[in-house]
Image (tube, helix red, strand yellow):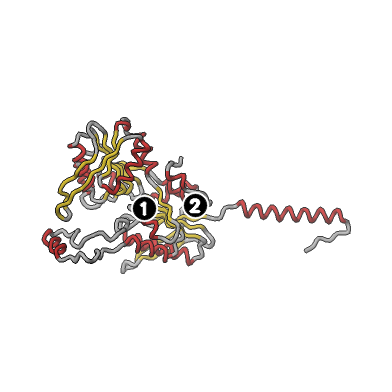
């Protein structure tokens, strides 16, 4: 209502007071950040808790359960209307169940009117199935069956292997994800499978920090890739440390059997540091470590972003010649560390927390590509 007063000076004073109050309310609205909610799936609650502790907020309330027929049910325990939602779920453990749980959580938040839903996926599931390059029988355990399959293969046609990483990308987008935050994708081209923004963080800054703090003679080291595909990764680390690099080429004469490993580079009287993005059954890195010792390496370390360690991996590491096998906590490692004293863990929760904070505030995350936040 317009301010009316017999005294014009009094009227102007009232108008000025009203305008100042309105300006104060507007400033309060603009200075207050929009709300943020962080929820955790069942795959890695410890990492989610570390992230929210770093951000200084509480973990969102969510109840996940399974029906008697093993269907997954998710109930979001608080309002997410107009909120900036982050869901932490790693591709580890029971991968298919955890992926389905993530999709249901994303959809539940989206249809509950969340303003934005970001999936924080430290270890992206199905990342190794990113191209059609497998031949029929290539993974066949029975040698005769593998030979028969290859003999009958019509070379005019490409392999019928699926590109499952693209399928997972489509599922996340259809579920309602607006943004993806992950770490060390097996192939960085997976980012192109999405039509939504993808922030692919790198463990490299944390790896460099660990090497400098835990390997006293790191200046006499050589960074080694266990296969040709990781050459770009090791050259980047070697350049940052100002040391040499080497790589190992695998020659396969039979399906599922490494006939020989050819070392390209000189590791004699040096500390060899094997670097890879993930290790599953650890057959490759164990063979690589033996080859490096044969070539004269004084010590062998292995540094891996995603330590899956399935099947005989733990027993292989225990029997191998590693000084230490270093992994990040993108996948839960407490059980693996209990079973194998050689396994050490780098905490990368601060990198994900900082990525969440910067994304929420509309800031650039490129700082995290070459620095560890403190």
Q: Of 343 and 147, which appears nearest the observer?
A: 147
Describe the element under mark 1 as helix, strand or loop. Answer: helix
Placement of the N terminus among the 4 image quadrants = bottom right
Residue 14 locus on image (x, y percent): 80, 55
Distance of label 2 from label 1 (alpha carbons): 20 Å
Looking at the rendered image, the disc whose residue lies closer to the viewer, 2 or 1, is: 1
Q: Is residue 249 left or right of residue 27?
A: left
Q: Of 36 and 359, which appears nearest the observer?
A: 359
Q: Of 286 and 112, which appears nearest the observer?
A: 286
Q: Residue at x 38, y 41 (%)?
A: 206
> What residue would you read off at disc 1?
188
> What residue would you read off at disc 2?
359
Residue 19 locus on image (x, y percent): 74, 55
Mark 1 surroundings within 10 Å by alpha-carbon count, few (fewer than 14), some (14 through 19), many (20 or more): few
Describe the element under mark 2 as helix, strand or loop. Answer: helix
* Residue lying at the far front of the rendered structure: 156
Q: Residue at x 82, y 54 (%)?
A: 12
Residue 184 locus on image (x, y percent): 36, 49
Instruction: Give the mark nearer the N terminus: 2 vs 1.
Output: 1
Mark 2 surroundings within 10 Å by alpha-carbon count, few (fewer than 14), some (14 through 19), many (20 or more): some
* Residue lying at the far bottom of the rendered structure: 69
Q: Is residue 345 visible?
A: yes
């Amino acid at each position: 209502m317009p301010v009316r007063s017999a005294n014009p000076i009094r009227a102007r004073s009232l108008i000025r007071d009203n305008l100042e109050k309105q300006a104060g309310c507007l400033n309060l609205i603009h200075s207050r950040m929009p709300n943020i909610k962080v929820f955790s799936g069942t795959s890695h609650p410890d990492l989610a808790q570390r992230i929210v502790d770093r951000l200084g907020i509480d973990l969102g309330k969510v109840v996940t359960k399974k029906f008697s027929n093993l269907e997954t049910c998710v109930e979001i325990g608080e309002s997410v209307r107009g909120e900036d939602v982050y869901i932490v779920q790693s591709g580890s453990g029971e991968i298919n169940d955890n992926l389905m749980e993530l999709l249901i959580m994303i959809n539940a938040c989206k249809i509950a009117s969340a303003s934005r839903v970001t999936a924080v996926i430290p270890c992206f599931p199905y990342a190794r199935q990113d191209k059609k390059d497998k031949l029929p029988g290539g993974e066949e355990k029975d040698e005769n069956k593998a030979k028969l399959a290859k003999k009958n293969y019509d070379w005019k046609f490409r392999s019928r292997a699926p590109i499952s990483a693209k399928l997972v990308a489509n599922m996340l987008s259809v579920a309602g994800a607006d943004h993806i935050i992950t770490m060390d994708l097996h192939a960085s081209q997976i980012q192109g499978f999405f039509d939504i923004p993808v922030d692919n963080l790198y463990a490299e800054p944390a790896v460099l920090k660990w090497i400098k703090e835990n390997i006293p003679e790191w200046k006499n080291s050589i960074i080694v890739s266990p296969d040709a595909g990781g050459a770009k990764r090791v050259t980047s680390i070697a350049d940052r440390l100002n040391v040499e690099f080497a790589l190992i080429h695998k020659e396969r004469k039979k399906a599922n059997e490494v006939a020989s490993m050819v070392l390209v580079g000189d590791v004699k009287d040096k500390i060899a540091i094997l670097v890879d993005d993930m290790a599953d059954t650890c057959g490759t890195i164990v063979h690589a470590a033996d080859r490096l010792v044969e070539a004269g390496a004084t010590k062998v370390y292995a540094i891996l972003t995603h330590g899956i360690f399935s099947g005989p991996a733990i027993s292989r590491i225990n029997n191998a010649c590693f000084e230490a096998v270093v992994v990040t906590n993108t996948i839960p490692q407490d059980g693996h560390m209990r079973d194998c004293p050689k396994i050490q863990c780098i905490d990368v929760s601060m990198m994900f927390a900082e990525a969440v904070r910067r994304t929420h505030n509309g800031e650039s995350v490129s700082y995290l590509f070459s620095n560890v936040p403190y």
